[in-house]
Amino acid sequence: MKSVKVSGKTIEEAVAFAVTQLHAKTKDNIDYNVVEEPKKGFLGLIGSRPALIEARYKPDPAEEAQRFLSRVLEDMGVEIQVVKAESRDREAVFHLYGEEPGVIIGKHGKTLDSLQYLAQLAANRYAKKQMTITLDAENYRQRRRETLEDLAEKLASKAERTGGQVVLEPMPPQERKIIHAALQSNQRIKTYSSGTEPRRYIVIAPA
């Protein structure tokens, strides 16, 4: 990680210089240690000493995820724009726009989920606390949520009607959460997850 030693009349001034030298957006994008405290000296001149800090660029996890995605999509040979829709302390949402959305969504969103997983790994290389990355394309996430909620209701009815268990296909954690949430108010059935990742699945059974 690149670091620089910077001096200034005050620590604040040295930090401002470090932000410029490291091409950071704000002081929040750097970490620094004070090497020498400033000293005013006699009459403000004799024996005075500037502040000296050692500063390092601190990558923004969301920005690193965005850069990673752009490189991967370029290597895939698809013209897709990565736009950050929102970013909070521990979560960032990106929308992918392009002429070939189906290529990056994949069957049942598997390609999109894989890209999301890799982007999350890229972000968490620089995050102090675990960060969640969400990718969406062509409003796929909302459409998939509605599909899963409809599926959950139909399979819950089947479990009630037959009195037996209904086993769903393996799903990623975020999709299993949708199924569980859709049926949590149904007192006639119960849901639980079984198996191990990445083949973990949901079972719907009479209560």
Image: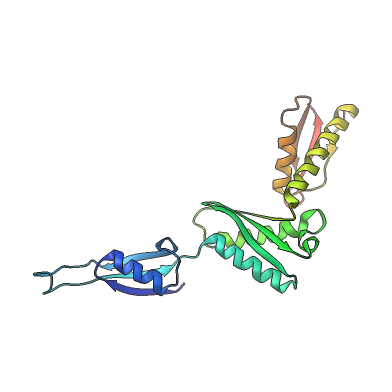
Asked whether 36 or 73 is in front, the reply is 73
Q: Position of residue 189 (x, y in %)?
A: 78, 28
Q: Residue furthest right?
A: 162
How many numbered marks appear? 0
Compared to residue 162, the image places residue 30 above or below, namely below
What residue appears at the point 54 percent right and 61 percent down from the top-left corner?
61
- In the rendered structure, the answer to whether residue 29 lies left or right of residue 50 reads right
Question: Residue drawn at (23%, 66%), measured in percent from left and top?
Answer: 37
- Specify the quadrant of the image occupied by residue 190: top right
Q: Quadrant of residue 187?
A: top right
Give the vertical position of 170 relative to 48 (above or below). above
Q: Position of residue 77 (x, y in %)?
A: 75, 73
In the rendered view, would you say 30 is above or below 193? below
List x then y, in percent, for residue 94: 64, 57
Closest to the observer, 7 or 169: 7
Asked if residue 28 lies left or right of residue 88, the reply is left
**Is residue 19 among the parts visible in the rendering?**
yes
The answer to whether any part of residue 195 appears in the image is no
Q: Residue at x 77, y 65 (%)?
A: 99
| Residue placed furthest toward the left | 43
Image: 185 above or below 166: above
| Image quadrant where one finds the C terminus | top right
Residue 149: image x %, image y %?
78, 39
